[in-house]
Amino acid sequence: MYICGMKNLGLLIIVLFALSSCNKANKEIRERITNSDSVAINYFSGDGTIDTVVAIKVIKDSQKMEQLVNYIAARSNEGNYTCGFDGSLHFFKMNKVIQDIDFRMNEKGCMYFTFVLDGKSQATTLSPEAKELINSFRK
């Protein structure tokens, strides 16, 4: 009985550590981009390749930017870095890029925000609501 309890305790510790590391990445990206004063969105051709930018939009509306930040920092994910990209986000503060984030949203099963934070590739889930918001900026 004691050994079984120790196994469960060990498993609980591993799960808590994994969850806390995911939340740390979400918190870090949120803190990094939340005070941006604008975001430039590059829309690629939509087939996963980055060779063609078909539209560029700059967003300065703080409420819409906050909404986008909330979607980006909502849920960590393992990410599939072979999916390609449908666009990129470039967060600015005082005319300097503070964070680049790529996104894939036009292929079911490959809906991610991907970025490098502290030298490590990270990914968060791109929800249907985030896709809708990003598409609304393009119009």
Image: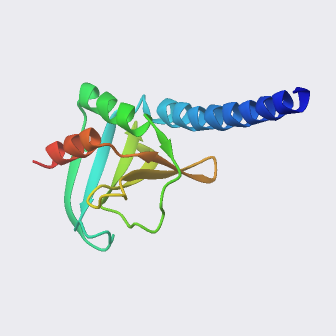
Q: How is the image coloured?
A: rainbow
Compared across the picture, whether 110 is left or right of 139 comes to right
Quick check: 108 left or right of 133? right
> Which corner quadrant holds the N terminus?
top right
Q: Residue at x 70, y 34 (%)?
A: 17
**Residue 121, above or below 67:** below
* Camera-side residue of 64 and 131: 131
Residue 4: image x %, image y %? 83, 32
Q: Quadrant of residue 105?
A: bottom left
State whether residue 109 appears in this view: yes
Which residue occupies the extreme front position in the image? 1
- Residue closer to the observer: 10 or 90: 10
For the view shown, which residue lies furthest in the right direction? 2
Left or right: where does residue 27 sit relative to residue 40?
A: right
Between 96 and 34, the one lying in front of the other is 34
Report the residue at 25% width, 71% height from top: 52
Does 9 sit above or below residue 127? Answer: above
Residue at 26% across / 25% down in the picture?
63
Q: Position of residue 131 (x, y in %)?
A: 25, 46
Please name whichever residue, 38 or 6, is drawn nearer the observer in this view of the structure: 6
The image shows residue 57 at horizontal and vertical percentages of 21, 49
Image quadrant where residue 67 sits: top left
Left or right of residue 63: residue 119: right
Which residue is depicted at the point 42% across and 30% down? 34
Expressed as whole percent of the image width and height from the top left, the position of residue 35 reads 42, 28
Q: How many marks?
A: 0
| Residue 95 seen anywhere in this rendered image of the structure | no
